[in-house]
Image (tube, grey):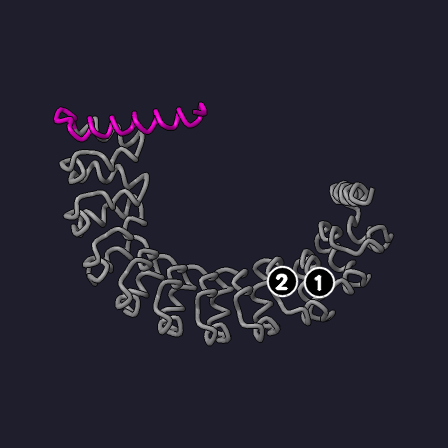
């Protein structure tokens, strides 16, 4: 036999002996059982039943691996107070909770107060409950993923979600992704939520300005037609030169646009077309007599040179 096979065989035999001796060990104490589970969670599966009924030992086990609740005594899987304590340790224990709890309105209400994503494990009937849904998404906006589709069209539910996390907009219905009020609320909380807006609103200048005012990087998700619009882009670049990064290439070659960008923020030089990076007028606008800016310009040009070499 190959050495590797022999090692596996002896390891298996050793573990079987341990399981048999551990299951029959009446002298095993609670503290020792907890110590064993903390060192190797898998030991929980083979503990005597009296320990798999013990709340402290089970909590120690599920804190490390939620699936170990499957091996706990069934009485604990139905115990509301215990399961709420277990959720504090590891939300995913809810997968192994008794089905009666997943259908229990008061239990699931308490669970989503602790962690909105607990809604993932609720019975489908409760995922249609507007009150529970609002509590869940208020705690964690992304719990919107788990509500029933009928509530993803509900403005109250979606508003609650995007006010907690604007990017929860990705889980809203397509109808609400076209709703300007909803989208503006989402990007006000998180400008990158623009990514999930309907294409029609990615062309809306008012919507895009709200997002880009918070961070120029959000311009990445605007419609290309706006990135080519010189007047629109100049209005953004005057506020933050770094908006040049997401401008259309034609505008990165436009001297007026580039000068406006670098005058606002010397770092914008990095995004200018190569043909303008060494242009005297552009460089003059970028440093405007500031020694620190001169050093930054030098670093940008040296970095470009290394890329081209």
| Residue 36, magenta (yes or no) | no
Residue most toward the right? Answer: 280
Q: Position of residue 80 (x, y in %)?
A: 17, 52
Sequence order check: which comes first, mark 1 or mark 2? 2
Q: Which residues are magenta?
A: 1-29
Tag 2's secondary structure? helix
- For the residues bearing labels 1 and 2, Cβ distance under 8 angstroms: yes
Checking the image for residue 247, the label placed there is 1
- Please state if 185 lies on the left or on the right of 9 as rendered: right
- Residue 85 seen anywhere in this rendered image of the structure: yes
Tag 1's secondary structure? loop
Q: Main secondary structure of the magenta part?
A: helix
- Please state if 93 lies on the left or on the right of 178 as rendered: left
User: From the viewer's perspective, is residue 24 above or below residue 233?
Assistant: above
Q: Residue at x 27, y 38 (%)?
A: 61
Badge 2 density bin: few <14, some 14–19, many ≥20, Cα 10 Å? many
Residue 241 sits in quarter: bottom right
User: From the viewer's perspective, is residue 50 above or below residue 175?
Assistant: above
Q: Position of residue 287 (x, y in %)?
A: 78, 48
The residue at which mark 2 appears reads as: 219
Q: Residue at x 82, y 61 (%)?
A: 255
Q: Quadrant of the N terminus?
A: top left
User: From the viewer's perspective, is residue 291 above or below residue 249?
Assistant: above
Cα separation, mark 1 vs mark 2, equals 8 Å
Q: Position of residue 278 (x, y in %)?
A: 85, 50
């Amino acid at each position: 036999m190959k050495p590797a096979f022999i090692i596996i065989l002896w390891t298996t035999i050793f573990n079987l002996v341990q399981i048999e001796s551990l299951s029959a060990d009446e002298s095993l104490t609670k503290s020792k059982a907890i110590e064993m589970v903390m060192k190797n969670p898998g030991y929980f599966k083979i503990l005597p039943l009296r320990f798999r009924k013990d709340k402290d030992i089970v909590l120690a086990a599920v804190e490390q691996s939620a699936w170990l609740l499957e091996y706990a005594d069934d009485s604990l899987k139905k115990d509301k107070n215990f399961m709420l304590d277990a959720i504090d340790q590891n939300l995913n224990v809810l997968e192994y909770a008794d089905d009666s709890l997943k259908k229990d309105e008061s239990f699931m209400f308490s669970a989503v107060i602790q962690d909105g994503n607990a809604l993932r494990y609720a019975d489908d009937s409760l995922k249609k409950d507007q009150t529970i849904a609002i509590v869940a998404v208020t705690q964690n906006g992304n719990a919107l993923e788990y509500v029933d589709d009928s509530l993803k069209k509900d403005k109250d539910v979606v508003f609650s979600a995007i006010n907690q996390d604007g990017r929860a907009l990705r889980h809203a219905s397509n109808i609400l992704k076209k709703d300007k009020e909803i989208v503006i609320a989402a990007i006000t909380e998180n400008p990158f939520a623009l990514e999930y807006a309907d294409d029609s609103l990615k062309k809306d200048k008012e919507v895009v300005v709200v997002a880009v005012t918070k961070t120029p990087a959000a311009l990445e998700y605007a419609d290309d037609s706006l990135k080519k619009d010189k007047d629109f882009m100049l209005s953004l670049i005057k506020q933050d030169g770094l908006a040049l990064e997401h401008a259309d290439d034609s505008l990165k070659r436009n001297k007026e646009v580039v000068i406006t960008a670098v005058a606002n923020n010397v770092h914008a030089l990095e995004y200018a077309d190569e043909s303008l990076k060494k242009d005297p007028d552009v460089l003059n606008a970028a440093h405007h007599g500031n020694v620190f800016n001169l050093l930054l310009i030098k670093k940008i040009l040296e970095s470009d040179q290394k890329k081209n070499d």
